[in-house]
Amino acid sequence: MLVNHASRMSQSFTLGKLLSRAGCKLAALTLALGLAMPTMAAEWPSRPVSIVVPAGAGGGSDGTARILSKYLKQELGQQFNVINLGQGGGVVGIQKIISSKADGYTLGILFNYAHYKEMGQADFQASDFTPIGQYNFDLAGFQVKADSPFTNLRQALDALKADPAKYAIACAGGCGGSWPMAVAGLLDAWQVDLQKVRMIPGQGAAAAMQDLAAGGVDFVPCSLPEADALLRSEKVRSLAVFGSERQAAYPDVPTLKEETGLDLELGSFRALVAPAGLPDDIKVKLETTLEKIYNDPEWRKEMEDRGFRPQWRNAEVFGEYLEQHTRDVQALIGKLNP
Amino acid sequence: MDAIINAFSMVMTFEVLVVMMIAALYGLSVGAIPGLTASMAVALMVPVTFFMDPVPAIAAIVTMAAMAIFSGDLPAVYMRMPGTPASAAYTEPCHGLSQRGLGEYALSMSAVSSAIGGSVGVLALILCAPFLAEFALNFSSFEYFWLACMGLTAAIAVSDSSPVKGAVSLLLGLLVASVGLDPVSGEARFTFGNADLLGGLGFIPVIIGLFAVAEILRFCTRNSRAGNSRQAALVPQKPMLLQALRDIFKYKVGVARGSFVGVLVGILPGAGADVAAYISYAMSKRAAARRTTPDEVNMAKIVPATAANNAAVGGSFIPATVFGIPGDSLTAIVIGVLFMKGLNPGPTIFTENADMINAVFLAFLLANLMLIPFGFLAIKLFKRVLQVPQSILMPVILAFSIVGAFAVENTLFAIAIILAFGVIGFFMEENGFPLAPMILGIVLGPMLEETFITSMMRAQGDLMVFFERPVSLALAIITLSLWLLPLLLRLFKRRTGIAPESPAHRQEECTQ
Amino acid sequence: MKFSDITLGVSFTLLGLAVLVHGQQMKTSPFFQYGAGFFPSIIGSLLAVCGVILLIKGIRLTLVQQGGFWLVQAGPWMRDRERVINFVLVPLLVVAFVAAIESVGFPLCSVLLVGLLCQRFSGRPLLSWVTAVLVTVFLYLFFQQLMSVQLPMGVLTDYQGR
């Protein structure tokens, strides 16, 4: 590398010159800004708020978050922007929620997060969040292919108990997610040997349902709206919905309680949270606003039209539920893995 | 007949047409900016569509998708940067044409063939959706495994230079795709304890880096000072519309093949417009070699691929409307909107909501036809960009790349990715490694690995499972013969001597 | 900058082996022969094979050509200091951009990045800085306002939304 353009060099800007110029400009700008610094507004929110969704655009969590953000904007007068961080199956997004400043300007949507720690992917704990309120709980359904030999849940559970390794259960996503954990919870209650059960990871509920119809797996747990089209086209059947009351839109699907007598509610929750340490005034304001939205029939209709089941837990109740949920999942994963 | 007239009256309203035009402009600009994907744009439109009637709402989305896939070709041709991943397969030959002053011609052909491909996709959707969706329901992980293997074969075709370098590029792509959390075991791979790497290397930032940032670095090595030159593509050209409409007949077989491939790939959930473009490009290679001039050879490879990626959009709507199975994030959002509008996907959609769904399909067809006038408008407008001196344009592109990468991933790490892959892309180019196989590796790597491992989990380690199901067996035979036949042929040909390596990289341009 | 097939061959062989070793160290499931390291190991081995093929090709070429042994060849642009500075400036500015954006905010960083590079490349200050400001305004309006992408605003955070 030879310098054969020295003359040209002298005419041109050098990097140093440029940078020093830039430095001057920067200093001037910051100075000007500092002088014009606004007095901090006392009333939250005084600027747009971000809602971190630890899932990609287009999924269920994203859908509920975008509906919620619209109503939050109506109520609080500021923009609520949905930020999708679905990388690493949600690890990146949840990490972002936890590590953000607890000033009320970064909120997050939380779902079943407890498995990340158990699987060694991250170190999330219930105490990392300020619970605000849970607004959605989708019950898991238990689907089989139309020509499956099983006609009711009891048969399927007994068959699994007799030979756990014979059947493949799709996880409808990662195997620590809400749906496989719901099934694992049920199997555990039925005293099936969890270590022998074959859980197959995959790309989410839609892919798992397709796989079920193609005969690749034997059972798929996911919410009934996610299975809707294939149910109606009679490619698959739902053996039960994991709750105590039948769903209005699916009156033919029996409940877990009817089928087995177990009074369990299993599925996936979605809640609004903030990083730990959110100031109480903001927390209370958010909680009351969220409850108000929850009781808005328009919001409810919009949620139900998209197939989401509204369910309310206020900050305190949800906080306790979150801890309980974390312990349950830890126990289950412990039983799944030797 | 009544149904069609009803559908017509629902689409040909002022509201629907205005909405479609706005959506077209939105889609064109989103597609032309690297980093902005069609699905992201659609996700943002969902809250707006809530206030609309179903027909304009869905019409807006399909119009936007069709336009975005086409307009990804604009920066691919003029700047060698694909606007959307769907254009990555043929970016290099496209840009080659542009450098020879044929950019506008190539884009005009692309607009016409995109419109044809897109229309074929919609017609397939209208005419044989239930049948094709039934076919797609035969695909489990075993079939997808063979499909991924078949896709990898395309890597050989898309790498024009030495096969070893193509293979290295493909392997690097597979390696890039395996960074992050392994979706099957949940274990972290190649993350070296770094929290950002846990999320993997985002596909779009990698593409932006390999193409856009690498191009900026190449610009730095071309012009030392005052690169105020404008692009060569600005030779005044006669109206291209008529010529493109005429010339497309020269490639009619290719366009038909591309559209067909596009529909088939599109209906399979998980393989989208980008895979369709790759496979179609690979399939056209042999037929294209028979053309006389080099430009025609390139066109014969590009035109079917542009038809294929647009046809795949129509194709992906088939499982989405019939079984509510989304092929990609775009159709996932569309399904959400269908639900919201009470048009629940399912086979009954064609009987219960016949008028409505026909109107939606008609709007979809119209959107593809609009591609021709709007496409030409976009070509003319985009050409203006090139009147900006390169020394100004390149930094601006850098800013767009940075913000685009950030927009997709919402992390600053995405900016680090574009920089790293910009440097990697630059050195790969300098040393004659083709980029297209790498992209293919990134697309297919996760699919190949996941389908193989989960299949093995299902079969409890029995490899024969890949040959047991009928569709799987058929795909296995096709794939294995695709691999073995050229190998055998080459063995015979090799006797005559080693084929000379084709010049892969372009000439060093020395301005000083 | 070009590397000879020998250099490339050696480096890809090493990379492949490193990937292979890394893949072998990954846990395998106790019930199952294919763990997380299965695929990386295959990729690593194939990469190493490709590296060896490149190396052999390189050695062959060296033996055939006279004085054909070389490892790295500098491109013509590397003899021009101006171009080398340009080439290094781009990554440096991007790194500075990433480092500064959280505290300084996107608008200022973007204006500086585009402005500095334009000025450096074109040597026309007015055009450069006007472009920089316009592009930044456009990016802000399009991405932040229209596409609701949350760009870091740094010191400008408190001015938002009023």
Image: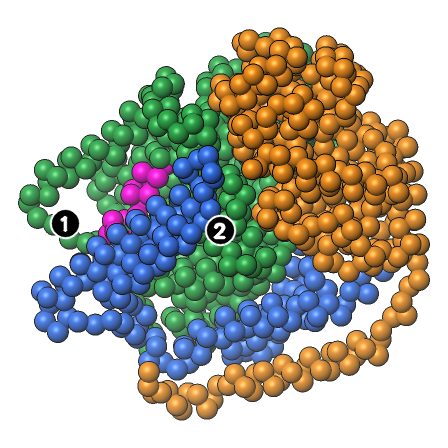
Chain colours: A orange, B green, C blue
Tag of residue B149: none
* Mark 2 or 1, nearer chain start: 2
| Mark 2 neighbour class, 10 Å CA radius: few under 14, some 14 to 19, many 20 or more | many
Magenta highlight on residue A318: no
Residue B271: where, in percent of width, then height? Answer: 47, 34
Residue bearing mark 1: B499
Residue at figure coordinates x 46%, y 91% from the top left: A10
Residue at 51%, 44% in the rendered image: B182
Badge 2 vs badge 1, beta-carbon distance below 8 Å: no
Mark 1 secondary-structure assignment: loop
Q: Horizontal placement of B342 versus B467: left or right?
A: right
Q: Residue at x 51, y 23 (%)?
A: A165
> Does A43 sit left or right of B496 as displayed?
right
Quarter of the picture holding the C terminus of chain B: bottom left
- Label 2: which residue? B189
Name which quarter of the figure residue A66 lies in.
top right
Q: Nearer the viewer, residue C1 or B466?
A: B466
Measuring from the top left, give residue B359's x and y in whole percent. 63, 21
Please report, as a chain letter, where disc 2 is located. Answer: B
Closer to us: C140 or B336: B336
From the viewer's perspective, tell me whether residue B67 is left or right of residue A181: left
Magenta residues (range): B151-165
Q: Amino acid at mark 1?
A: Ala
